[in-house]
Amino acid sequence: MMNPKEVQRLKERAPLPLIVTVIMFFAPQFLIDPLIDNLETTGKTFDGLVAQVQGALRQRTLDQGLSARRAAVRREMDRLEAWLPPEDYLPTLIDQFNALADILGVEIRSVTYRFPSSTPEAGPSRRVDIHLALAASYEAMRSFLQAVEGLPSPLVLTEVVANQDQTFTVSLQHLVKP
């Protein structure tokens, strides 16, 4: 058993442990709960920032891909621009038609050409429409068309009309620099 003096001292000190116990009981509510709320808010903010960073990284990847594609298209456009002849090449091309026709026995009766009208949206026209009225045998005509397709010019054969009197109408598009 305890000494009466010790019991008396404990009774005198009893309020202090009781107060400490009450403080320890309510401390989590007053000290830890605000920290937990702050932690939850910080976690939500962090999650939002992580989502923004992931979106920015995806957008950067897309932008890099588009930049690479744009550079590739620009290189191809420059290569095409270097390959396309200027508009003033047309007389030379018609001279080549005449030379081929003489070699292959084709008579060129008329050559007409026009530059399609340009629109503000599409810019200046990049082609010349050429129409040839020819007289030749079928075999000579086939040879002429094959020779025309073999010319080192960007020509697109759009229409060939065979008439009954061994005449042909040939429509071509000649691609040019604007």
Image (cartoon, rainbow, N blue to C red):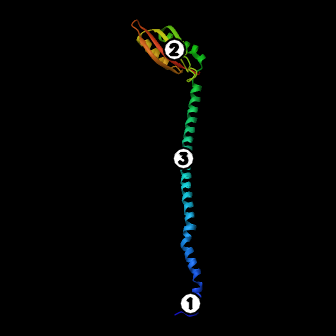
Q: CA distance from mark 2 to mark 1?
A: 123 Å
Check disc 3 and report its element: helix, strand or loop: helix
Within 10 angstroms of label 3, few (less than 14), some, or many (20 or more) residues? Answer: few
Q: Amino acid at mark 1?
A: Val
Q: Which residue is mark 1?
A: 7
Which of the two marks, 2 or 1, is nearer to us in this view? Answer: 1
- Quarter of the picture containing the C terminus is top right
Amino acid residing under circle 2: Ile
Where residue 13 appears, as percent x and y from the top left, is 59, 84
Left or right relative to 167: residue 85 = right
Residue ID for mark 2: 130
Question: How many C-alpha atoms fall within 10 Å of the one at disc 2: few (<14), some, or many (≥20)?
Answer: many
Compare marks 2 and 1 and give the one earlier in the sequence: 1
Q: Is residue 32 above or below residue 102?
A: below
Q: Residues within 10 Å of mark 1 (few under 14, many from 20)?
A: few
Which residue is disc 3 drawn over?
55
Between 27 and 165, the one nearer to me in the picture: 27
Residue drawn at point x = 56 percent, y = 67 percent: 32
- Measured as percent of width and height from the top left, residue 152 is found at 54, 21
Q: Earlier in the sequence, mark 2 or mark 3?
A: 3
Q: In the image, which is nearer the foreground, mark 1 or mark 3?
A: 1
Q: Which residue sits at x=59%, y=86%?
A: 12
For the residues marked 1 and 3, what is the alpha-carbon distance in whole angstroms?
70 Å
Q: How many marks?
A: 3
Relative image position of residue 108 (x, y in whole percent):
49, 8
* Mark positioned earlier in the residue sequence (1 or 3): 1
The kind of residue tagged 3 is Gly
Determine the image quadrant of residue 117: top right
